[in-house]
Amino acid sequence: MTPEILSVMALLGVIGLAIMWWASRRTRPDAGLWPGSWSEAIEKMTANERRIGDLQHELDLVKRENQLLNDENRRLQETQKLLLRQLADMQQRVSSLEHDIETLQKEKTRNQPVAVGELRQTLATKFDENELRALAFDLSVDLDALPGNGLLAKATELVAYFDRRGQLRRLADEVWRLRPS
């Protein structure tokens, strides 16, 4: 409560006491200036005024604490926004670095010479005949037109076919794409 309200309440209390005194004098002309009930009323009014003051003080403390919490909340929200921006920047940087690493690994693989024996072994052990046929088809080669019978013979001929045309890297890249391990 504001000091103005407290002053008005105190004034109303005094007016109320005066009215009660006047009314008691009219009904009991022999009553003294401050009968016992008046003393009790004044004590209660004084106690109430003290209680109002205590409550006002408590209210002021709660308002101050609320203001401090609001200020802290604003600071935390600003910090959260900053951290979210930093996180987004870091995620973008990580994504960029992952892309760079992937590009470098592909470039490294392309620049390495193809081990013909290893490529033939991978085709013979990691592909079945239907998968080898599908790989050859995807690379525009008719596997049946190549000499040899059996998976190992067809794998050997497929590697030799691409090696003779200088396209061994093309075959190796497709095998690596289908079987990265």
Image (tube, rainbow, N blue to C red):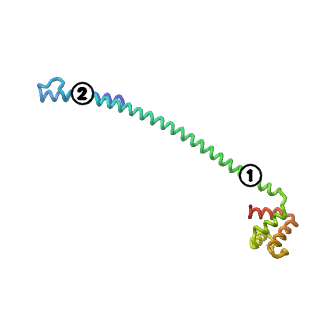
Q: Which quarter shows the C terminus?
A: bottom right
Tag 2: residue type?
Ile
In the displayed orientation, state which residue is furthest to the top. 33
Q: Would you name the residue on which mark 2 appears?
A: 42
Q: Which quarter shows the N terminus?
A: top left
Residue 33 rendering spot, x and y as whole percentages:
17, 23
Q: CA distance from mark 2 to mark 1?
A: 87 Å
In the displayed orientation, state which residue is furthest to the right. 164
Question: Circle 2 sits in a helix, a strand or a loop, which is it?
Answer: helix
Image disc number at residue 101:
1
Residue 100 rendering spot, x and y as whole percentages:
74, 51
Of the two numbered discs 2 and 1 on the same chain, state the one appearing first in sequence.
Answer: 2
Question: Circle 1 sits in a helix, a strand or a loop, which is it?
Answer: helix
- Total tally of numbered discs in the picture: 2
- Considering only vertical position in the picture, is 96 above or below 146? above
Q: Quadrant of residue 79?
A: top right
Tag 1: residue type?
Ile
Quick one: label 1, few (<14), some, or many (20+) residues within 10 Å? few
Circles 2 and 1 in contact, beta carbons < 8 Å: no
Image disc number at residue 24:
none
**From the viewer's perspective, is 39 left or right of 98?**
left
Q: Quadrant of residue 60?
A: top left
**Residue at left 84%, top 61%?**
115
- Considering only vertical position in the picture, is 131 above or below 7? below
**Residue at left 58%, top 43%?**
81
Q: Nearer the viewer, residue 96 or 176?
A: 176
- Considering only vertical position in the picture, is 45 above or below 176? above
Residue 140 rendering spot, x and y as whole percentages:
80, 70
Quick one: label 2, few (<14), some, or many (20+) residues within 10 Å? some
**Residue at left 84%, top 58%?**
113
**From the viewer's perspective, is 120 left or right of 48?**
right
